[in-house]
Image: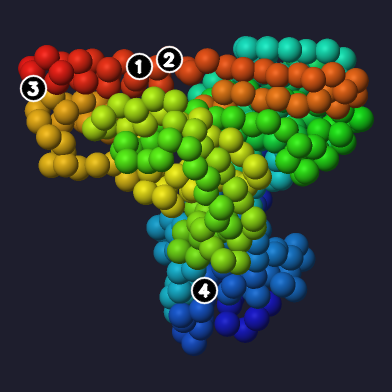
Amino acid sequence: MPSSFALLSRVMTESFTQEKTQLTLQAHADCGNERIDRFLAKAFRDDQEPLSRSRIKSLILDHQLSENGSTLSDPSAPVKSGATYILTLLPPVDATPKGEDLPLDILFEDDHIIAINKPVGLVVHPAPGSLTGTLVNALIAHCGESLTGIGGVLRPGIVHRLDKDTSGVMIAAKTAVAHANLTSMFAAHDLDRRYQALVWGTKIDRDGSVDAPLGRSNFDRKKQAVTSKGRHAITHWHTLRSFPPFATLLECRLETGRTHQIRVHMAHIGRPIIGDPLYGRAPRAGQMPDVTARTCLAQLRSFGRQALHAAHLGFAHPVTGEALCFTSELPDDMQKLLEIMDGAIATRARGKI
């Protein structure tokens, strides 16, 4: 144990649901200002149960560290000289997903693949904060043992993903050969993927393309950004309908498939997707020409997710080679946005502004 720490106690407790270990340490007077996660990793490096810095960081983010009796949730916080820290170690959780009887809107299914219409709000695979209730859990329950281990234990059958709040067509593999071939097709971009996106504003060419590399943002690690050091990314768009002065409904076709590609590319050209919490920037009320338009804008601004829908997926069957194409209509919440704009446009046309 480093001399800058004194391990005061190691106590294991057991409750009805789980057992846990609490480590109580006191920082010496000469050890202030170092990051707490780095400091704790050093402290437990030679302990009977060494803890990695990544494990400690995860525990801190999970509110399992207290400083002088108060919860500390920032791994980068500086150590306070003389402070008493209590780190709670919870037993590891089995991360293997289990089958759950969840509803699936199945568009197609055979012995090798299954195509579904993913609803808004459904997470594709288990991850911290969403360990259950995912598409993977539903697929395991629906497909049974045939899905076990295909493509990995944690994401069986998954060959691509949609964001939680993006709806539309998805495909999953039920056999190892289908998984391998579909994975190769996605890597080679050998599929026809089209999305419908409702973007702010109407000043946009009828057809166009965005060719801009994408990578992780240097300012927010949760976001992607256009960057010269990013990966090649191309999005093509075609205008389906214009709703002046509010928005435009686009069909976006992916030539590549990067994380948040359409969302970032549309924001990059000044036409962010309505409702996008990461990249969207709505017009201001003062930019609207009249009361009717401002009322409509307020309704559009209240939309609770990115207005993006995976409407079309075409590809060759990964085993038989048969040409397949699956489509999905706009979900009700996006359709409602179109109706709101149509109503406002009609009201303004009648001069009732």
Dot 3 corresponds to which residue?
353
Helix, strand or loop status at disc 4? loop
Mark 3 or 1: the one toward you: 3
Is 72 located above or below residue 345 in the figure? below
Q: Distance between the residues labelled 1 and 2?
A: 6 Å
- Binning the other alpha carbons within 10 Å of mark 4 as few (below 14), some (14 to 19) or many (20 upward) gives some
Question: Mark on residue 50?
Answer: none
Q: Is residue 129 above or below residue 313?
A: below
Q: Do the residues labelled 1 and 2 touch (CB within 8 Å)?
A: yes
Say what amino acid the circle numbered 1 marks: Lys
For label 2, the residue is 332
Image-quadrant location for residue 128:
top right
Q: Is residue 30 visible?
A: yes
Observer-side mark, 4 or 2, equals 2
Residue 48 is situated, as x and y percent measured from the top left of the image, at 77, 66
Q: Are marks 3 and 1 in contact (CB under 8 Å)?
A: no
The residue at which mark 4 appears reads as 35
Tell whether 182 sits left or right of 68. right
Instruction: State the residue position of label 1.
Output: 336
Q: Tag 1: Cα neighbours inside 10 Å, few (<14), some, or many (≥20)?
A: few
**Residue 187 screen position, x and y as percent:** 77, 44
Foreground label between 1 and 4: 1
